[in-house]
Image (spheres, grey):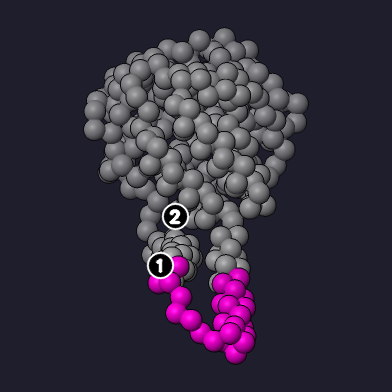
């Protein structure tokens, strides 16, 4: 029926390269039955271990395996974009090398494309193995971003997604430097079938996503797909102007009626600190949007390739 491109972003995944390939090849019968040719694109995102060497060893055994090495670590978003750009398939699927995206789901995912869907996406229904505090903040993020953005971002959504060429081409038209793929998927639209599965822990190694990195990633997602924080800053400014005006009236009336006894300075200090904090918070919101705009207008490349084969 055509060519299936399998995009695999990698960063320090030398222990998982072969495991992923072997697990993927368990679907060989499915590929043959559907008449699918396969290309496997490992995108090495500036790994510091032997990830690239492991992929090269695989390539000697199977010429369907391809390698794209970045000149440094540009981040997973850049690796996903590079993989989509380099893919040639009529169908493209993105998968993590750590086997948290089970290759065994591919036959079911492909069946929905044959039913007429443009893409098939996955979401995990549990967060088994994650620290409770991280799971809590993840759920809060999805609730918040779906309230303030018109773009739907599904709770628990993975990057594991099978797409037609039309969907891939639509995503590639979004050439922004600050990328938030989960939001981009929702923004481009197209009919999507969601599949749920239990969370699968990594085969080897540890996650590269610390709490701080996830927090910054969440901020990127909010800024990329909502301008409500800017409106919030404006609303808070207007609100405090109204409060200040009312307080001035109260002070004037109180002075005319009962005089002006000296008030306590602690309450004044608290008010000054609170108002200053609000001002800095609003300034920080504006600064975040300004910094993203600054990076966009530079028009730097999303990634740089050091080696490709």
Which residues fall within the magenta stretch?
239-267
- Residue 188 visible, this orientation: no
Badge 1 marks a residue whose secondary structure is helix
Please state the horizontal and vertical placement of residue 63, each as a whole percent of the image. 39, 22
Q: Nearer the viewer, residue 194 or 228?
A: 228
Predominant secondary structure in magenta? helix
Q: Is residue 242 magenta?
A: yes
Q: Considering only order in the chain, which callout, 1 or 2, is on the residue closer to the N terminus?
A: 2
Above or below, comparing residue 83 to residue 207 in the picture = below
Disc 2 target residue: 177
Please state the horizontal and vertical placement of residue 262, each as a whole percent of the image. 45, 79
> Which residue lies at the image location 64% right of the left edge and 52% below the top edge?
149
Above or below, comparing residue 200 to residue 179 in the picture = above
> Which residue lies at the image location 29% right of the left edge and 26% below the top edge?
51
Disc 1 target residue: 266
- The residue carrying pointer 2 sits among few (fewer than 14), some (14 to 19) or many (20 or more) residues within 10 Å by Cα, namely some
- How far apart are the two marked residues, 2 and 1, measured between alpha carbons? 47 Å
């Amino acid at each position: 029926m055509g060519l299936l491109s399998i995009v695999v972003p990698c960063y320090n995944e030398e222990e998982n390269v072969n495991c992923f390939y072997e697990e993927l090849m368990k679907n060989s019968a499915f590929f043959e039955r559907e008449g699918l040719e396969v290309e496997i694109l490992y995108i090495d995102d500036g790994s510091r271990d032997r990830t690239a060497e492991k992929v090269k060893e695989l390539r000697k055994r199977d010429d369907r395996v391809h390698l794209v090495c970045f000149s440094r670590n540009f981040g997973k978003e850049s690796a996903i974009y590079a993989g989509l750009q380099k893919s040639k398939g009529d169908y493209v699927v993105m998968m993590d090398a750590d086997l948290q995206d089970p290759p065994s789901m591919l036959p079911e995912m492909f069946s929905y494309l044959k039913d007429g869907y443009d893409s098939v996406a996955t979401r995990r229904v549990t967060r088994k193995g994650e620290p409770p505090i991280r799971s809590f903040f993840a759920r809060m993020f999805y609730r918040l971003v779906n309230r303030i953005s018109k773009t739907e971002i599904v709770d628990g959504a993975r990057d594991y997604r099978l797409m037609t060429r039309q969907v891939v081409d639509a995503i590639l038209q979004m050439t922004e430097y600050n990328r938030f793929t989960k939001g981009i998927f929702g923004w481009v639209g197209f009919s999507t079938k969601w599949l749920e599965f239990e969370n699968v822990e990594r085969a080897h190694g540890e996650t590269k996503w610390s709490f701080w990195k996830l927090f910054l990633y969440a901020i990127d997602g909010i800024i990329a797909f909502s301008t409500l924080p800017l409106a919030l800053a404006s609303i808070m400014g207007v609100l405090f102007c109204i409060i200040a005006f009312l307080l001035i009236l109260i002070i004037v009336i109180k002075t005319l009626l009962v005089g002006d006894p000296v008030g306590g300075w602690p309450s004044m200090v608290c008010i000054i600190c609170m108002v200053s904090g609000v001002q800095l918070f609003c300034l920080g919101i504006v600064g975040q949007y300004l910094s993203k705009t600054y990076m966009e207008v530079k028009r730097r490349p999303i990634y740089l390739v050091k080696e490709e084969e």
